[in-house]
Image (cartoon, rainbow, N blue to C red):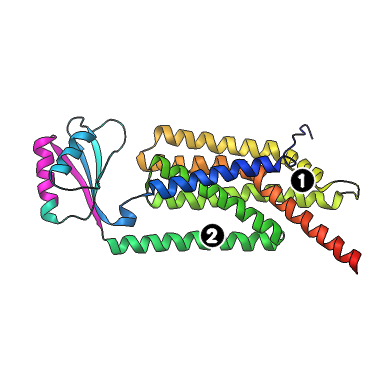
Amino acid sequence: MRYHFEFVRPWKTWFIVSGLLVILALGAFFIRGLNYGIDFTGGTQMNLRFTHPVTATAIKTVLTRDHIYGSTVVFVGKGSQNVLITTPTISEHERTALLSQLGSKVGHFHEISTSRVSSIIGRQTERTALIAVLLAIVAIIAYIAIRFEWRFALSGIIAMIHDVIITVGLIALIHIQITEYFIMAVLTIFGYSITDKIIVFDRIRENLPKKKKQDALEDLVNKSLNQVLVRSINTSTTVIIALLALLIFAGTSIRDFALTMLFGVIFGTYSSIFIASPIWLLWRKRDLSNKRKRTASA
């Protein structure tokens, strides 16, 4: 082992930092809220390609004049000619009138596609997404509990929820639109985060039988973390490079997915070392202490 960083003993510092991040994330979530896309709220989405570059301000001015509020205007791909306009649910007459105004006030365009999602379907999508997330959590708890033990399972889940809360808080802060890509990103974060933690837990479990009586449990956990440090950093760096490439070269929807994933990977790697392992350590030490007390009183 080439490294010996002290990860475990300053656990109070890591918990305070994470606690503050979670509080700030929850504050951003409750104050700013999430920017739900058409998949969840219902509405009308029009994909237009203008013959010359246009501005979001010009399009929003037309929307406001037509009394269509709560809309978003997103440029797709490079340049400012391909535009994705999302509005609350509007009638066919209102849509036709809006397109006519855009043609006369903003510029000529070709209508690539129009899609409509009812609010009922939006609510169904929201329920389906929530069920998918809950099932993923249950499956992860069951897998780790079977493969390891319940302390590892709960420590991993607590750290994983920590990752998702902070990621969602950042998404709320920068107001990225919540679409099906966001749900895919969250589920992928679950998978990445728990896989990273399983690597750490597996090394701790592997080293436990080697522990001598005089060895402190903190030293064993710290040794395990140092042993997997290079692997964890290399894996995270590889994933981050791929996500940065998507952020630079991909379209808007994929960029939102990549940014959500980037937050999740960074905080998932952080929590594997600084949150999940100390939680397991404190839990294990408490149980060992209680066991010794019961033995002494018997």
In contact (CB < 8 Å): disc 1 and disc 2: no
Q: Is residue 140 above or below residue 28?
A: below
Secondary structure beneath dot 1 equals helix
Decide if residue 258 is on the left or right side of residue 281: left
Which label's residue is closer to the chain start, 1 or 2? 2
Decide if residue 261 is on the left or right side of residue 6: left
Q: Looking at the image, can residue 168 be seen?
A: no
Residue 259 % position (x, y): 45, 40
Q: Which mark is residue 57?
A: none
How many numbered tags mark residues here? Answer: 2
The quarter of the displayed image where residue 82 is located: top left
From the image, which quarter does the C terminus lie in?
bottom right
> The residue under label 1 is which amino acid type?
Val
Secondary structure beneath dot 2 equals helix
Q: CA distance from mark 1 to mark 2?
A: 27 Å
Crowding around mark 1 (Cα neighbors within 10 Å: few <14, some 14 to 19, many 20+) is: many
Magenta span has 236?
Answer: no
Q: Looking at the image, can residue 109 be seen?
A: yes
Crowding around mark 2 (Cα neighbors within 10 Å: few <14, some 14 to 19, many 20+) is: some
Decide if residue 14 is on the left or right side of residue 170: right
The quarter of the displayed image where residue 221 is located: top right
- Please tell me which residue lies in front, 146 or 296: 296
The quarter of the displayed image where residue 246 is located: top left
> The residue under label 2 is which amino acid type?
Ala
Q: Nearer the viewer, mark 1 or mark 2?
A: 1
Residue 203 % position (x, y): 75, 48
Residue at the bottom extreme? Answer: 298
- Magenta segment range? 95-117
Residue on which the image places disc 2: 136
Residue 136 % position (x, y): 53, 59
Residue on which the image places disc 1: 221
Q: Residue at x 57, y 49 (%)?
A: 162
